Image (spheres, rainbow, N blue to C red):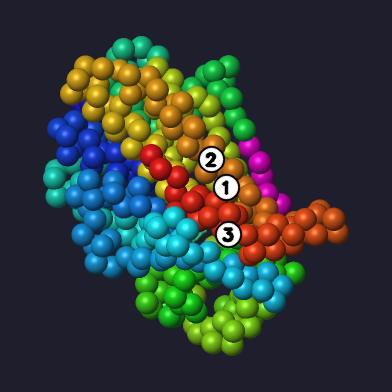
Amino acid sequence: MRTQVAIIGGGPSGLLLSQLLHKHGIQSIILERKTKDYVLGRIRAGVLEQGLVRLMEEAGCADRLHAEGFTHEGTLISYGKEVFRIDFAKHVGTPVVIYGQTEVTRDLYAAREASGGQIEFNVEDVVIHGADTDAPHVTYNIGGEPKRITCDFVAGCDGFHGVSRKTIPENVRQEYEKIYPFGWLGVLSETPPVNHELIYSNSPRGFALCSMRHAQLSRYYIQCSLNDDPQNWTDNAFWEELKRRIPDEQADVLVTGPSIEKSIAPLRSFVTEPMRWGRLFLCGDAAHIVPPTGAKGLNTAASDVHYLYHGLREFYERNSSDGLDTYSARALARVWKAERFSWWFTSLMHRFPEQTPFDLKMQMADLEFLRESTAAQKAMAENYVGLPY
Ligand code: RFL
Ligand code: PHB
C-alpha cells in the first residue's frame, strides 16, 4: 500500500491529524494496535481549550461538541477552609469547554469513517523503516499477515508506550522525566455533578478533584498511593474519602451512586527532544506526558497536531519544508510551558510524602497568594485556558 502520511496510533492525535489532512486532500492511513471499542473505553480528558475546539471545527467535527459541551468560565480552588474562584472570563476573556475525550474520539472516528478514511485496527509489530531517508516505509502484521505501507512521512501518534519515539536513536534523543510519588484514583458515576464548575482541592488528606462530563455524569478523582489498587476501594469508601477532602458546602450535597468506571493513573512529567527525526514526527503523548492536574495532555497533543498539519500542508501545497523543519522547535516551545504549568499546579495542590513543615508553609503561602493576587489569578487563568498557538 502507499499513502502520503502513515499515522501510527488511532487515539485523538492520530485521528485529528488524519481528518485535518483529509480536509486538504492529503491522504493518510492510521494504524491502531487496539480495537475502536477499546480506544473509546478509555476514560481520560474532560477539559478542552479553545485551540482544540477550533481544530475540531476546522476538521468538521464540532457539531456535537457545540451542542453538548459545557462552557466553563471559571474554576474553584479550595484549601483549608478557604474556597476561591479563578474567573477565566474576567482575567483572560476565554472559557474552556467540558466535553470528554471519549466523545472527541468518537466524533473523529465517525468523520473518518464517513469520508472513507483508512484505519487498520488490531495491528501488531509496527516497525518504522528508513525514517532518516526520503523514502520511509512501515511494516506491521494483522492476524499474522505481514503488511507494508510506503509513504512520504510518518506521524508517531502512538502515545507514551508506542514504538515511534523508540525509533529515534538513543544518541539523538534526550529525555526529561519526573515521576510523582502518588497517583489519581478516578471514578465515573451517573450522578449529577456536585458543582457547576470544577473544584480542585488541596486537603490535609490529599488532593481531590470534582469534574464532570455532562448533567448526569460526574468524574471525581482523589490522590492515592502508587501501591493502591482500585479493587481496594469500595464505592462507599471512595465517596466518604472524597467528602473529607472537598469543601463542606459541596460535601453536604454530593450525590453518590454506583461507579461505572474506577481506575488509578500514575502521575508523570515527561518530554523527549527533538520531536522530529528525518521524516518521522512525534505528536501528543508519544513525545510528552503531563500530570493531569492542569488538564493539558490532550490539549498539548492538539497544539502538536496544529503545527504538524500546517507543516505538511506547506509541504504539499507550496513545496516548502519550512513548517516541517521548524515543527519540533515550535511544538516544544509550547510543550515546555504546558509542562511547567502542570508541574506547578500539581506541586501546589497535592500533599507530598516527603513534604517538610517548611514545604507545607510554602505551599500554603503560594495558595494564599493565588487567592489574594489578581496578577497571580490572571497568570493561572492564562495558562489554564491554554496559551495561544
Ligand atoms: P493516546 O490517547 O495514548 O493514543 C495513542 C494510540 O496509539 C495506540 N498505539 C499503537 N498503535 C499502533 N502501534 C503501536 N505500537 C501502538 N502503540 C500505541 C494506542 O492504542 C492509542 O490508541 O495518545 P494521543 O492520541 O497523543 O492523546 C493524548 C491524550 O490521550 C492524553 O494526553 C490525555 O488523555 C491526558 N489527559 C488529559 N488531557 C487534557 O488535555 N485534559 C484533561 O482533562 C485530561 N485528563 C488525561 C486526563 C489523562 C488521564 N490518564 C488516564 C492518563 C485524565 C486522566 C486520568
Ligand atoms: C477530567 O474531567 O477527567 C479532568 C478534569 C480536569 C483535570 C483533569 C481531569 O485537570
Indicate which label's residue lies in the foreground, 3 or 1. Answer: 3
Q: Residues within 10 Å of mark 3 (few under 14, many from 20)?
A: few
Q: Tag 1: residue type? A: Phe
Question: Is the CB of mark 2 within 8 Å of ligand 1?
Answer: no
- Is 271 situated above or below 321? below
Q: Residues within 10 Å of mark 2 (few under 14, many from 20)?
A: some
Indicate which label's residue lies in the foreground, 2 or 3. Answer: 3
**Most frequent secondary structure within the magenta stretch:** strand
**Which residue is labeled 3 in the image?**
374
Tell me residue 170's x, y (percent): 57, 20
**Disc on the earlier residue, 3 or 1:** 1
Residue that appears at 32% across and 19% down: 322
The answer to whether the residues at label 2 and label 1 have Cβ atoms under 8 Å apart is yes
**Which residue is labeled 1 in the image?**
341
- Tell me the magenta residue range: 177-182
- Is 16 situated above or below 107? above
The answer to whether the residues at label 2 and label 3 have Cβ atoms under 8 Å apart is no
Residue that appears at 34% across and 31% down: 308
Tell me residue 266's x, y (percent): 61, 52
* Element marked by disc 1: helix
Foreground: 219 or 227?
A: 219
